[in-house]
């Protein structure tokens, strides 16, 4: 190993690195595009071409052992209905069911209700000089929307969010060994299970009812409906993945725009730019910046062999800043940036099914916020970062109105 790379260290569990991983990711791209972490025994790719290629290589880099490093290392059986932890051919079947639910057209149809909720919450802040954007909106709205889609009563939604949130949280940089130690999802399954049983006897016009009653042909050729455990798996996935990432997206967007007043004012005056601003926010600060895969057969990357049985970390948050893709402005935030796509929603077979919903929530939240509060800064001394191995963002973000 050369002297230039001897001190290069990347650890997804290290809180200090996680606070600002971009310098480390740049060094990885430049010095070790295929990086190996001996402490946690994983390989990592960080350049755009390598990350995009890895996300598309579903034959050799598989998801069936989990897409989170701890899950791969734990070598546990994935629960049914977790489409993100499936590989073809079963993945094709399970994803097909979900794609009927999360079409862009269906997601856009709920925009009036999403907007109305934002308006109520933000109007209640009138007269205040500061607030925690996570508490008042970013953490509440995604669960409210998912609850609305699933048909979960409002009084149960906070308990569900608290349960999924506690399952992701790390108390320290060394807490990774206990994360996901119980992946049965028993906490949220208890919360969802009772309501699911009631909904089976009392169908309604919601996603849970649709999951219960939709007939499909599975990957073995059998025509059937989902089992109870499969429905619970779907619901747990929606509640978890649909909550945390969107919460982080809203927080990142508000924090980033605090440092770009000219662009913030441009968005206020030209709201048609907001959708592209959300895409740039997703590129600039990926809510879920790393994915992991199990290496099912040897893969050669940059002249080195990543052996079968390994875990590989795919740093999409780094790829989104790769100057090889984005040019000399890769580390800058630009609401007018022209892009074909970023990798914050993944790529290929496992592209995020909830992308249209996350975009909708981020767009509406920013639009309604700018209408009321065009000028703000962040009190970092009283703000708090979240610490998980799967998503990156803020648990508390104090917005001070100017």
Image: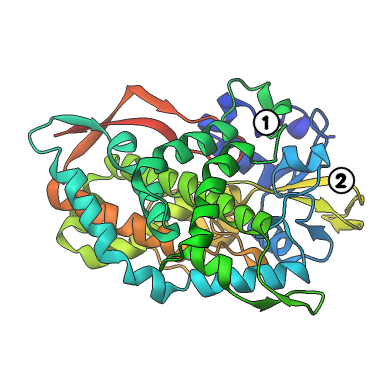
The picture places residue 98, in percent across and down from the top left corner, at 57, 68
The answer for how far apart the CA atoms under marks 1 and 2 are is 19 Å
Q: Is residue 195 visible?
A: yes
Quarter-wise, where is residue 84 in the image? Answer: bottom right
Which sits in the foreground, 224 or 81? 224
Q: Measured along the vertical axis of the image, is residue 237 above or below residue 171?
A: below
* Residue at the disc numbered 2: 310
Image spot of residue 268 (x, y percent): 17, 56
Q: Earlier in the sequence, mark 1 or mark 2?
A: 1
Dot 1, crowdedness within 10 Å: few (<14), some or many (≥20)?
A: many
SS class, disc 2: loop
Crowding at mark 2 (Cα within 10 Å: few <14, some 14-19, many 20+): some
Say which of 72 and 343 sits in front.
72
Q: Residue at x 39, y 68 (%)?
A: 107
Name the mark nearer the viewer: 1 or 2: 1
For image coordinates 35% across by 70% down, the residue present is: 108
The local secondary structure at tag 1 comes to loop
Q: x, y (%) of residue 208?
A: 50, 61
User: Residue placed farthest to the left in the image?
Assistant: 127
* Residue ID for mark 1: 179
Q: Is residue 95 above or below residue 266?
A: below
The answer to whether residue 82 shows anywhere in this view is: no
């Amino acid at each position: 190993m050369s002297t230039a790379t001897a001190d290069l260290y990347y650890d997804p569990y290290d809180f200090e690195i996680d606070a600002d991983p971009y310098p480390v990711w740049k060094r990885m791209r430049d010095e070790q595009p295929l990086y190996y972490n001996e402490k946690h025994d994983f390989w990592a790719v960080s350049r755009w071409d390598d990350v995009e290629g890895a996300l598309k290589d579903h034959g050799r880099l598989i998801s069936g052992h989990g897409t989170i490093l701890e899950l791969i290392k734990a070598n546990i059986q994935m629960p049914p209905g977790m489409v993100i932890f499936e590989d073809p051919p079963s993945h094709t079947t399970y994803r097909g069911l979900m794609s009927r639910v999360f079409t862009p057209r269906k997601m856009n149809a709920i925009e009036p209700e999403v907007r109305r909720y934002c308006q109520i919450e933000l109007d209640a802040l009138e007269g205040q000089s500061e607030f925690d954007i996570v508490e008042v909106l970013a953490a509440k709205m995604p669960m409210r929307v998912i609850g609305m889609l699933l048909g979960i009563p409002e009084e149960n939604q906070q308990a569900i969010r608290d349960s999924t949130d506690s399952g992701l949280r790390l108390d320290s940089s060394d807490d990774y060994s206990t994360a996901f130690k119980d992946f049965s999802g028993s906490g949220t399954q208890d919360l969802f299970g009772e309501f699911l049983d009631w909904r089976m006897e009392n169908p309604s016009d919601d996603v849970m009812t649709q999951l219960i009653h939709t007939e499909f042909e599975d990957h073995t050729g059998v025509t059937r409906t989902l089992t109870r455990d499969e429905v619970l798996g779907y619901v747990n996935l929606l509640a978890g993945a649909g909550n945390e990432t969107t919460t982080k997206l809203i927080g990142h967007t508000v924090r980033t725009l605090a440092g770009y007043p000219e662009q913030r004012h441009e968005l206020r005056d030209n709201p048609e730019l907001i959708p592209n601003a959300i895409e740039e926010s997703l590129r600039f600060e990926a809510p879920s910046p790393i994915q992991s895969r199990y290496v099912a057969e040897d893969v050669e990357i940059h002249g080195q062999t990543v052996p079968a049985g390994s875990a590989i970390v795919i740093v999409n948050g780094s790829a989104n800043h790769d100057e090889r893709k984005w040019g000399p402005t890769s580390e800058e935030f630009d609401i007018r940036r022209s892009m074909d796509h970023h990798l914050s929603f993944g790529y290929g077979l496992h592209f995020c099914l909830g992308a249209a919903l996350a975009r909708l929530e981020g767009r509406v939240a920013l639009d309604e916020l700018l209408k009321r509060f065009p000028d703000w800064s962040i009190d970092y001394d009283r703000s708090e970062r979240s610490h998980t191995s799967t998503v990156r963002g803020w648990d508390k973000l104090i917005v001070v109105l100017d």
